[in-house]
Amino acid sequence: MTDQTTPATATASPREVVERLHRLVLDQDIEGQADLYAPDGVLEWPFAPEGVPRRLEGREQIAGVLGVLGQRIRQSGTRPAGLHSVVVHETLDPEVVVVEFELHGEVLATGDGYRLPYVQVARVRDGAIVSFRDYFGAGTARALAAALA
């Protein structure tokens, strides 16, 4: 469900929508993340490992897979702690932003930290994500494969 205090609106810029998505990731709010997608939005993981879908179509499918992923990540005992080295590239296309960052997190049982690099390309129209490509490193690919196995 979209948080009523800071709803996604048709006037939100692509940058604002992606920043909201990142806050929801850190809060582990799966429903809120899915709500940011247009009903026919697409989430792509081009570097997804074997057994993990590379393309999710429609808010309902995105919500379903993110829900399973979120549950398994919480069960794994890891927690995202913050985004670092964030660089947002606004493009000549007013609907598109490219974001580079490193996700820092913690393994709760040991206190060990982890760092995972990402590059994301988002197309936002009328305040909703219509296309989101999430390019991640090998560490994320392994975690994704284990979580969705």
Image (cartoon, rainbow, N blue to C red):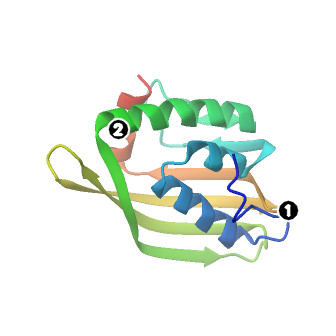
**Mark 2 packing: few (<14 Cα in 10 Å), some, or many (20+)?**
some
Q: Secondary structure at mark 2?
A: helix
Residue at left 71%, top 47%?
35
Residue extending farthest left: 110
Q: Is residue 53 above or below residue 25?
A: above
- Expressed as whole percent of the image width and height from the top left, the position of residue 9 reads 81, 64
Q: Quadrant of the C terminus?
A: top left
In this rendering, the count of numbered labels is 2
Q: Which mark is residue 87?
A: none
Q: Which residue is mark 1?
A: 126
In the image, taking residue 9 as reference, residue 57 lies left or right, namely left
Between 126 and 42, the one lying in front of the other is 126
Q: Residue at x 46, y 23 (%)?
A: 51
Real-space Cα distance between discs 2 and 1?
A: 33 Å
Which quadrant would the N terminus be assigned to in this image? top right
Q: Is residue 130 above or below residue 54?
A: below
x and y percentages locating residue 14 in the rendered image? 72, 68
Q: Which residue is mark 2?
A: 143
- What amino acid is at disc 1? Asp
